[in-house]
Amino acid sequence: MIRLKASAPERPLLLIDAGNTRIKWAWITGDGDALPAAADDTPWPHAGARPHDQLAELVEDWRDCHVGTGAAPPEVWISTVAGPALRDALCARIARVFDGARVRIVASEAAAVGLRNGYRDPAQLGTDRWVGAVGARHAWPDTALLLVTAGTATTLDIVAPDGLFAGGLILPGLTLMMRALSRNTAQLPEIDIGYLAARDAQAQTIVPPWADNTQDAIALGCVTAQAGAIAQTWQALQARYPGAARCVLSGGARAALGPHLRMPFQMHDNLVLLGLQVLAQAGHEGRPGVATPT
């Protein structure tokens, strides 16, 4: 278990991870939350996720966390890779519901809270990857880390034991891979992660890694491609940093991908939210968000 410094009791924290498909969030009150270093279920008592087209429902979720508490408006920390339109819509909704909320937009930078950015252009690194690495570095300091985030894209990121974000890989996510085959061929059917999960649940074993029908061939082909990239990166990590190394799997497709990995790994619900909490409670200065009610 790790414990972060409690936020000011009169001003809760609202952490927002706006991805390409969903908006994930956690609400943290002033008594602080003990966060497990790894968790399959969310480590935050008040947390959730909704697709982009449910902003109104999302705001109601946050209002429910705040109503009746007597607390000041929240301090809001946002990591977004979903573009300026969604960012501005989030800020506007927050301003309308929480008058006086402090909004901070996080961006990738050269260094923060013990993590150094090894990208040639630090600003080019996706905010979600940077903030997720901040969270992972806090949870597992002085450890070589392979961070696998299985979402709309699958990202593989390396954090060195000395706190260097060394770089990584970006792959199409499982769903994108499967859709690309059906949408760019004449006869291949479209399947999704649900099909893969159902197949794995029914199968006695997931080996051998080949199939006797087209749907299974697509499912196994896509997940094996992902697992192979992860395995190769894991081997390179162990060769580059001999000694203790750790693989952490997160993202919405983690449950579908996990059974196909052949190395030890831990799951975490959302490293980006953990990184936002680390930045907020360490007194880091994000960029002020423009919270204009509409």
Image (spheres, helix red, strand yellow):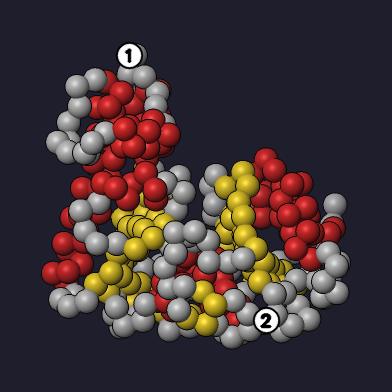
**Disc 2, SS:** loop
Residue 267 in sight from this viewpoint: yes
Viewer-proximal residue among 4 and 133: 4
Nearest to viewer (mark 1 / mark 2): 2
**Disc 1, SS:** loop
Viewer-proximal residue among 67 and 124: 67
Q: Which residue is mark 1?
A: 187
Q: Position of residue 263 (x, y in %)?
A: 21, 58
Disc 1/disc 2 C-alpha distance (Å): 57 Å
Task: Name the residue: 33% across, 77% down.
Answer: 164
Q: Quadrant of the N terminus?
A: bottom left
The amino acid pointed to by label 2 is: Asp
The amino acid pointed to by label 1 is: Gln
To which quarter of the image does residue 91 belong? Answer: bottom right
The image shows residue 192, relative to residue 235, as above or below, that is above
Q: Position of residue 216 (x, y in %)?
A: 27, 27
Q: Is residue 271 left or right of residue 290?
A: left
Task: Name the residue: 23% across, 36% down.
Answer: 204
User: Contact (CB < 8 A) between labels 1 and 2?
Assistant: no
The image shows residue 221, relative to residue 120, as above or below, that is above
Q: Which residue is mark 2?
A: 31
